Image: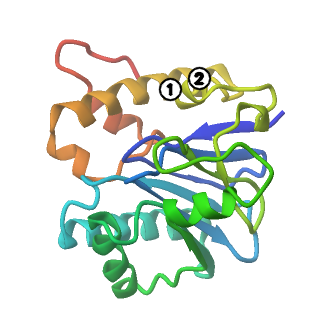
Amino acid sequence: MKNYRYVAQGEFFVTTDPNTTLVTTGMTECMALAFIDRKNPQNRLLAHLDGQILSNYENTQKNLATLINAFTDMTRTTEFDVHVFGGQRKRRNYRMLLPEMEKARLEITKSLDIHEFCQLYNRTPRNKINLISACCTLICENSLEPVYTNYDASYFEPKMSEDDLSKGKALLSQEEKEAYEKFFEVNEHVLSSGLGAAQQFRTSADKLWVEEHAPPSKKLSI
């Protein structure tokens, strides 16, 4: 069985495990950004960018630096493809991200915004989707080519709803599941509270971040 790791809003995750598949969903205004090692595609990063991560040019620049440093430090690679999925080219998030990617010398290998994706998807003999009904999903397996798709529970083995996937229920080990559940709860608190922490990338791999940002009324045991 594969180990499916969901990447939440405002999160990034780096893996070098060939059996781990990274997944993120819901890119209407948000955007997915993936780095894939050209020589060894088991080395991957997936990030979920929202309007808080892209709050201004300076903050966007800092968050991109976080991704680049985290990926290159863990994988020791300097040659990787860059994939961008979701968002809308004419809207603010795209206009904030692209200039900073150019400054960071992140050359985009492939990009699709939600309008382009819906057009391509609707050319196939499947149920038609639009800006409202689409659930843009980026799936990064141990492969040079990520999967740009609309969410479908049957893609996963066993079948998995988006809600269950987003809560870490497709992780194989109980330890990973429990750690991700804690991260998910704290991340939801950070997103809803308007804390400045929501403007900085975080990762479920960082147990210290989870402990430091837990709601005051609920101390977590890490």
| Kind of element beneath mark 2 | helix
Q: Which residue is mark 1?
A: 179
What numbered label is drawn on residue 164? 2
- Answer whether labels 2 and 1 touch (C-beta < 8 Å): no
* In the image, residue 173 above or below residue 119: above
Disc with the residue nearer the chain's start (2 vs 1): 2
* In the image, residue 69 above or below residue 159: below
Alpha carbon distance from label 2 to label 1: 15 Å
Question: Looking at the picture, how far across and down is residue 216, in whole percent?
Answer: 17, 19
Q: Residue at x 76, y 46 (%)?
A: 126
Can you see residue 157? yes
Can you see residue 85? no
Question: Looking at the picture, how far across and down is residue 197, in whole percent?
Answer: 21, 44
Q: Name the residue furthest right.
A: 1
Residue type, mark 2 in image: Asp
Residue type, mark 1 in image: Ala
Question: Looking at the picture, how far across and down is residue 127, in whole percent?
Answer: 71, 42
Q: Quadrant of the N terminus?
A: top right
Does residue 205 appear to the left or right of 4 in the view shown? left
